[in-house]
Structures are given as structure tokens and as C-alpha cells.
Amino acid sequence: MVERYSRKEMADKWSMQAKYDAWLKVELAAVKSWNKLGFISDDDCEKILKNAKFDISRIDEIEKTTKHDVIAFLTSVSESLGGESRFVHFGMTSSDCIDTAVALQIKDSLELIIRDVNELLSALKTRALEHKKTLMVGRSHGIHGEPITFGLVLAIWFDEIKRALELLEHSKKVISVGMISGAMGNFSHAPLELEELVCDELDLSPAPASNQVIQRDRYAQVMNAIAILASSCEKIAVAVRHYQRTEVYEAEEYFSPGQKGSSAMPHKRNPVLSENITGLCRVLRSYAIPAMENVALWHERDISHSSVERFMLPDSFITADFMLHRLTNLIKNLVVYPENMMKNLNLTGGLVFSQRVLLELPKCGVSREDAYKIVQRNAMKVWADLQQNRPAINENGESLFLQNLLNDEDLNKSLTQDDIRSCFEYGYYTKNVDRIFNRVFR
């Protein structure tokens, strides 16, 4: 529970207090802007800025009658003022206040998410550099392929999360817009200059054009950026879950002293964090669809989007913040087992070197078709030998595959014994890791 409460900073941004604070901030920015335009006197402006406040319980009480949250809010604010209250919300419609305020909340929340992602990137980079040369087997279709390093796996995760960060930064720019354009967005009751002054005060950009709302494609971009981030985070979590499988056991989540894995089986150490992350990422992706469906509103506006956003926005940001915090700690504390990685790399009796042998034969004039036949038939013998429980590596340190190749008459016509043995060197597969890292982390 300590971890959950440590994310209070994000939750606070979506509390009722934060919501009305943002509304009041927009309304006061409008008052200041009307004052700059000469419509509100300095005296009335000063009174409003000094005294305007709201009471949440009073807003709730008023809303029981009005059935309109903005009117209830404005009524509560007016009760803290005198005659100058007539200038609050002047020339504005509800969405001028709400959408501009929500833009502030989303912008602030994205800044926290961006901070979280940068912390995740830092953790991934640290672990990637630590395991830059840690050999392991690469897999495709879940089947052993060729040697790679665990550092390369982490570098790929880093590169992918970095792209997600770029999408988040772009979506922050897209959402950081405000509007004070009136009921239909035609600026009939307030000049464009008012909107420009308000947005400048709030560090937002004016929406180039709006109707009665900020257009919801902007929200959809934010939700899709979070959804893509979630997909990449789930990818990492799923990989960790695979690495922790008993049959694999190449890495595992940190298991703290006193921690329990099962009420029935005391031996259990389960990947509960990465499983939790997987589930949270599914939830985060689910918000992309309603966010995109909110784009198509009737004419200048309806409120079909409102009910969605009232829980979609706080839920997605609070969940993303929590998930990223959990994933970062998982990566920082991930326990890696290089010995087991090497054990698994040798599990298939040298088959991971098959392509290296295949590519040597065409250099000697052998057709690719014949080369493939030679290498494949020796590889298939290894699979059969492994099924018969023959040791993958003999007492001389030679793998089954190497033994088969050394005894193949057709192969020996093209390659010497030393040539064949040289195909089983791990350094061949790690020679470009430094250059890859330079490209990823430059």
C-alpha cells in the first residue's frame, strides 16, 4: 500500500479541489484579461482577484437544484463577492471554462507522466549498460534463434519507450490550448484578443478555431499516446514473465525477505508485478477507443463526451503514473542470472550457430540450396539426439551440432575442421553491440 499512496501527487491533480481550482484559475484569467482590455475597472478586478473563492460542499448543495455544475460553481463564487461578481464568466460559455481548465489539468498530468517515463528510461539505460555483453539466446516464435545479449534486449526496450516519450511530448503540445470563444465559437460576445490574453496568462495557446468545445481529436491524441506507451510497457512486462518461468529462469522480479508467493505452496516466487503491469496496460489501452469516439460530436457540441471524460482522464493518468512507477522499480531491481542465460544458450547443442555455418559455404562456391541441405540435415540430427537425451555438449566441450558437422563428409570438402570450429565463436555475435549502443544512447 505504500507504493499506492506514493502516487498521491497525480491523484491530487484530479481531485474535486483541483478541478474547481482550475476552473477558478480560468475565470480569474478572464477577469484580468477583461481588465487589460478596459472593460473591468482596476477596482473591480482587484476585488475579484483578492476575494473570489468557492466552497465544494456549497457547490454540491446548489447543484442539487440547478443540475448544472458550472452554474453551481459560479453561484458559489459569486457568494464570495459583491456587485463585481457580475463580471465573472462575462461573455463566456461553460466549455470556455471547463475545456480550458481541463487542458491545464492534462498538461500538468502529462508533465508528471513524462517525468515518470524519463525515470523508466534511466533505469533501462543503466541495466542495458550493465548487461551490454551478457550473452543469452535470442528467440523467434519462442524458439531459440541465435546468440544476442541481454543488454541489447534492454536497449531495444529503451529505444521503444523513447519513441513513446516523443508521442507524449507531442500530445502535450497538442492539448495545451484554451478557448474563450463563446457559445458557438464565433466570438460574438468577447473579442479574440480576450482569448489570446487568457491563454497567455495560463501558458496555453489559443485554439485556432473552436465551436463550443475544444475539439476532441486533441484528447484522442493524448489517450492514444498513453495507449501506445502502455503497449510498450506491457511488452516489457510479458518478457519478464517469460524470463521468470521455471523452465527458463533467466531473470526474475526481486523477491523481498518475508514475501509470500502462494497461500498453498510455500516455494512459489511469482511474477506478480509484471502480471499487474500487464493488466493495467490493458486498461490504459481501452481508453483509446472511447477517446476517439468522442471526436464525433453533434454539430457545435453535445455532451456525450463529458461522461466518458469524467472518469477516462483521471483514471488513465492515475493508472499510467502508478504503472510506470511500478515498472521502473521492477527494472531497477530485476534479478538477472547470466549463468542460466548461458545454460539456455547451450541447451540446443550448438544449433544457434547454424546460420553462421550456412553463410560460410557459399563463400566456398557451394550453392545456397546445397548449403542449406547440408546444414539442415545435421541440425535435424541434433533434435533427434536431444530427444534421446544425449548430452548437448560432450566432455571435450564440443556441442552435438559441432560434432555432426565435423563428421560430415560433404561439409569437409568445403570447410576445414578449424573453419567449422571458428563458426562457433560467441564474439561473432557481439562484435557490433558497441556500435548499436552508440546509436541508441548517443
Image: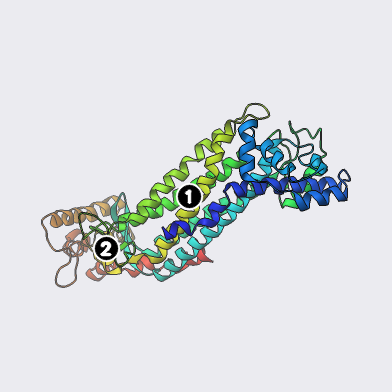
Mark 2: few, some, or many residues within 10 Å (few <14, many ≥20)? many
Kindly identify the residue that appears in the image at 68 percent across and 44 percent down: 100
Q: In which quadrant will I find the C terminus?
A: bottom right
Amino acid carrying label 1: it is Thr
- Gap between marks 1 and 2 measured at Cα: 37 Å
Residue 212 placed where, x, y %?
A: 70, 33
Q: Nearest the camera: 35 or 144?
A: 35
Residue 316 lies, with reference to residue 266, above or below; the image says: above
Residue 366 can be seen in this image: no
Kindly identify the residue that appears in the image at 52 percent across and 41 percent down: 312
Q: Is residue 377 left or right of residue 307?
A: left
Kindly identify the residue that appears in the image at 58 percent across and 30 percent down: 304
> In the rendered image, which quarter is residue 165 located in?
bottom right
Residue 319: assigned label:
1
The residue mark sitting in front, 1 or 2, is 1
- Residue at label 2? 345
